[in-house]
Each structure stands twice: as C-alpha cells, then as structure tokens.
Image (cartoon, rainbow, N blue to C red):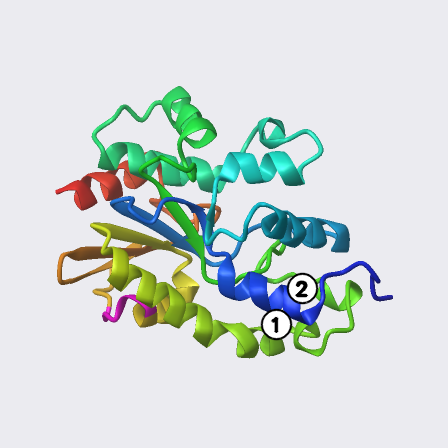
Amino acid sequence: MANLDFPSEQEIDEFASGFFGYGEFEAPLWFIGMEEGGGKSASDVARRIRTWQERGRAPLEDVAKYHDAILRDGFKSIRRQNTWSALSRIHLSYVSSETTGNATRNHWQKQLGRWGSLTCMMELNPLPSPGITAWNYPSFTEIPFLASRVAYNARYRNNRISAIREMVARHSPQAIVFYGRKYEPFWSDIAGVTFDEGQIHSQAVKGDVTFVSMHHPNARIKGKTSKYLEEIGAFLRR
C-alpha cells in the first residue's frame, strides 16, 4: 500500500537533481559511490528528503548535521560504518597521517563528509537503498518511475552522470576514488577515461586528475586489506 505522506514526484525530482552527497567541492580528494545506504522504510526516505529541503537544499550536506536531523539518536548513534572507515583510511594515507584504527574512527566521526573539511563524498544514485539488490520503493509509493530499478535508472542515471561530470570539470579535484567495480562503465562516463585494468582496482589519468576505480569497501575480495587501502592513498598522493 502506498504511503500517503511519501514525497511527490516533484520532490523526488528536485532531490535527485539537487543532492549529491557530503563535504566540500574544493576537497582535493573525492569519493564517489553507487548509492547511500538506508531507505528501509517509507518514513526514512521521506525524512531524508524533507530534511534536505528544510536545511536549504544544499548539493553537499554536512554528514553529521544531516544525520543529527534524520536519526532519532543523531549521528553519534552510528557506532560502526565500514564504508566510511575505508574511505577515511584512504584519505588519511593520502594526507600522510597515521592510519591506526583509532585514527580512522576519529576521522570518519569528525572529518569525513563535514562542511569545512578537506573531504567530499558523492553518490551516483540519488535515493537511498539497503543494498544494490534491494528495491523497496514499490511498497512505499505508486509513482511509476519507482516501480523498478530499471525505470528509476532510466529517469535519473544520465542526468546524474552529466551533473557529476560537470562538477568534476568545474572544481578539478586532484584525485577521485570511485568504489563499486560493477559500476565502472559509469565511472568511465563521469571521468571521460578508459581505465587501465588491474586485479583489485583500475586507474586512469586525465589532465591533472588521477582516477581510481576500486571494489566497494564491503566487497569480499582477496587482497583488499587495510594495507591495500593505505597504498591507494599513498599512490594518489604521489
């Protein structure tokens, strides 16, 4: 049954064309993933979209302040976040900082995705979902383009790729780490490059920007260790 309080088509379109992630565009190192987790209920999705509206419709939010607004117990209630932890480890190595467990935890809790930081996290897909194989939206709403991932992607995929490509050209970060190797064709479209294939990750350079395409931090891949993440950061630093 459709949720009567679920955002309208217009609200979803505005969110999809206006919200891209967290942090600062001027960060030298960007992270771009497939989609944000969450979206297990209609109320969660509605709260995320309406909070974004109420907070000023910023293209990049402050991850802690945003989650303080959408989570009952706030950002501090997030005790473990494997994806953010991996990105923090890469970033710490990139800036030649220590990469201990405590340092990594402190980084994602206090720096990653924050306004005023040197970090940027973005997503290709606009709406949250518990996983790439999950699609709960037909139980939330009868909006036609949310009836399937195919319809959803047809509506937003090309526009999101174009928008992120323009952001890359406008802000020219030093490096971008894409995570989710299954999405590598889309990463190529965004970067305007053909990646050199590697066993665990691919890489490419265009102008002054270095690109890496790696497996998602949650993917179980042989050789994808903490040291491997640190080596990516060191490689990008060089």
Res 159 → quadrant? bottom left
Q: Residues within 10 Å of mark 1 (few under 14, many from 20)?
A: some
Query: Residue 44 vs residue 59: left or right?
Result: right
Image x and y of residue 94, in percent? 23, 37
Residue on which disc 2 sits? 135
Res 72 → quadrant? top right
Depth check: give the residue in front, 66 or 88: 66
Q: Residues within 10 Å of mark 2 (few under 14, many from 20)?
A: some
Depth check: give the residue in front, 139 or 226: 139
Name the residue: 68% across, 54% down. 45
Residue range corresponding to the magenta coloring: 190-194
Secondary structure, mark 1, is: helix
Dividing the image into 4 quarters, which one contains the N terminus? bottom right
Amino acid beneath label 1: Arg
Can residue 100 be seen by looking at this rendering? yes
- 170 inside magenta stretch: no
Give the label on residue 37, or none.
none
Image x and y of residue 106, in percent? 42, 24
Name the residue: 38% across, 41% down. 87
Name the residue: 23% across, 70% down. 193
Name the residue: 27% across, 36% down. 230
Amino acid beneath label 2: Trp
Image x and y of residue 83, in percent? 47, 42
Can residue 199 be seen by looking at this rendering? no
The answer to whether mark 1 and mark 2 are in CB contact below 8 A is yes
Q: Is residue 136 above or below residue 64?
A: below
Give the label on residue 149, or none.
1
Q: Residue furthest top?
A: 102
Secondary structure, mark 2, is: loop
Q: Residue furthest right?
A: 1
Image x and y of residue 183, in percent? 42, 65
Q: Could you tell which of marks 1 and 2 lies nearer the N-terminus?
A: 2
